[in-house]
Image (spheres, helix red, strand yellow):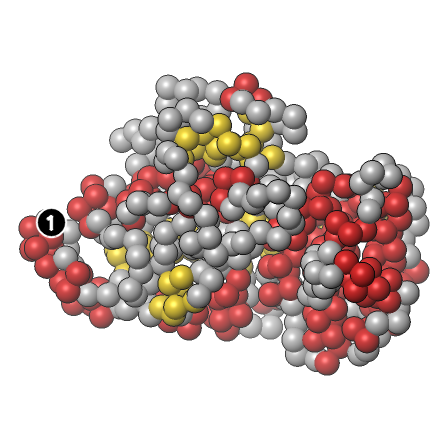
Amino acid sequence: MAEICYFGGLVHYKSPSLPLSLHSLFRSKKPHYYNSTSLMAECLSSSTVEPPSLLVFSGGTGFNGVVEELKKLTTRVAHVLPVSDDGGSTAEIVRVLGGPAVGDIRSRCLRLSDESTSEALAVRRLLGHRLPIDAHQAKKDWYDIVEGNHSLWDGVSRPYSETIRAFLIYFQNEVMLTDTEKHVFIGFIFDHIGNFFFAGARIFFQSLDAAIFLFSRVSEIPCDSLVLPVISTNDRLTLGCELQDGTIIRGQNEISHPTTGTTQTVDKRHCSTSALPSKIKRVFYMSSEGNNLLHEVFPPVNPTVLEQLRSVDCIVYAMGSLFTSICPSLVSTRNKYVVQKWWITKFVLLLNGSQDRETSRFTASCFVTAIADALNRTHGDTNIRLKNPTYIDIQEHHFCVQPGYYINTLLVPKDGEIAVDLKQLSEQGIYDVVSISFLHLFPSLCAQQTLTVTSTLLQRVVESVGDPKHGILFNPSSLINTLAGLVE
């Protein structure tokens, strides 16, 4: 019987003994628990001024580019990510071994990992390595890594190398034990070593939380930074969406970046796919075999996410795929934990700089409406599931509220493609919009409406950068400086 300590508690289960190197790794430093209270006390005991605390709802791509800059402001950040991605680098792992998709979790962990020593850089380089797209070379690289002969092991000490190799070997054994039609290794070309390590740890521990804990220890993530799956599960999750014309689309990849044939590589350029035939009405989780609304399921939200919602200074809805990266984390979140703090917390929406397949023809207020709809959803009640009532009664636990209670600040990248419709935003209760000069963009609108535009507001500009793959993006430094001004 193994006993694993994480999230501040003990979880017991039957499993093989831990690798000896894992005991060595755990003894090498102070224990790292995911209990947020003890984490904060330990990390801040030597500091008199606490940096701001944030909770960020994001996907695995859009927000990654600003993580390094965010660490300069604060490491007290809870990163909440979905685990329903059925495309990209983890698609084949999910197909063969089942379980949740960990690619976004792995990607964020690597972005947060330590870079202060040569060994930390070596571990990060190893776990971030992607196998070649050529099948023969990918197989050769993989076996060199598993056998410990690859140059990527240079600079990695024995405790770390033995721990990482143990779970890579465990992953390979699990693949070979599956049905013979599935375990052809060619399916894992162009995947990350970190995904294999993550999958091996998850299967070994039978726990996604334990796998994140181990990955965090190995990559030395700051002790007050949390990477949290919005749904803590060891099962596969399937995302579905309902379009306004009644069409049901199954699978996150089919919604956002559909592919043709059996190719594994997903083109995630913002202009790589055509718009959907109809706007998305809502997203929801489906049973593994379902294909219509009768197969909707309601997995419980990770309790640690709820704990963090009650304690942070600022909640950020990050830029990225609105319906497949942000909303999947909101449809499971108990919105009462957000609403109960609306008068003392900053709620910031980072508006995308470019349109994509999911948000074609959207304005800024459309993004706000989608987020409010996701948080207001009432399970099984089609009459109020997608409405935004005008009341809020915390004592009576009525939490279907106006958008302004969920978002009170909107950050817009300079020269972004998405129209900022100020009149509609003000009607939704959002009056703090940080962008380039409104008088330059909407002179007549600013003169007519009651929205107060101060000189201070006009001076707060969030600079942007152009990216050939993702379009207009926030300049990381400008974005974090603006966030700092909001929360400090």
Quarter where residue 335 is shown: top left
Q: Where residue 144 sits in the image (x, y, percent)? A: 86, 67
- Identify which residue is drawn at 89% across, 53% down: 18
Q: Is residue 320 above or below residue 137?
A: above
* Residue 384 seen in render: yes
Residue sitting nearer the eye, 61 or 213: 61
User: Which kind of residue does numbered mark 1 sit on?
Assistant: Thr
Look at mark 1 in the image and give the residue it sits on.
450
- Identify which residue is drawn at 43% across, 19% down: 381
- Identify which residue is drawn at 84% across, 72% down: 150
Q: Residue furthest front?
A: 261
Q: Where residue 83 sits in the image (x, y, percent)? A: 61, 44
Q: Residues within 10 Å of mark 1 (few under 14, many from 20)?
A: few
All told, the count of numbered labels is 1
Left or right, residue 475 beside residue 211: left
Q: Is residue 140 above or below residue 342?
A: below
Q: Residue furthest bottom?
A: 118
Q: Where residue 419 sits in the image (x, y, percent)? A: 25, 52
Q: Is residue 420 above or below residue 429?
A: below
Left or right, residue 463 beside residue 289: left
Residue sitting nearer the eye, 346 or 162: 162
User: Which of the image's four quarters has the N terminus?
Assistant: top right
Q: Where residue 327 sits in the image (x, y, percent)? A: 46, 41
- Identify which residue is drawn at 70% across, 57% down: 191
* Residue 486 seen in render: no
Disc 1 is placed on an element classified as loop
Quarter where residue 126 is shown: bottom right
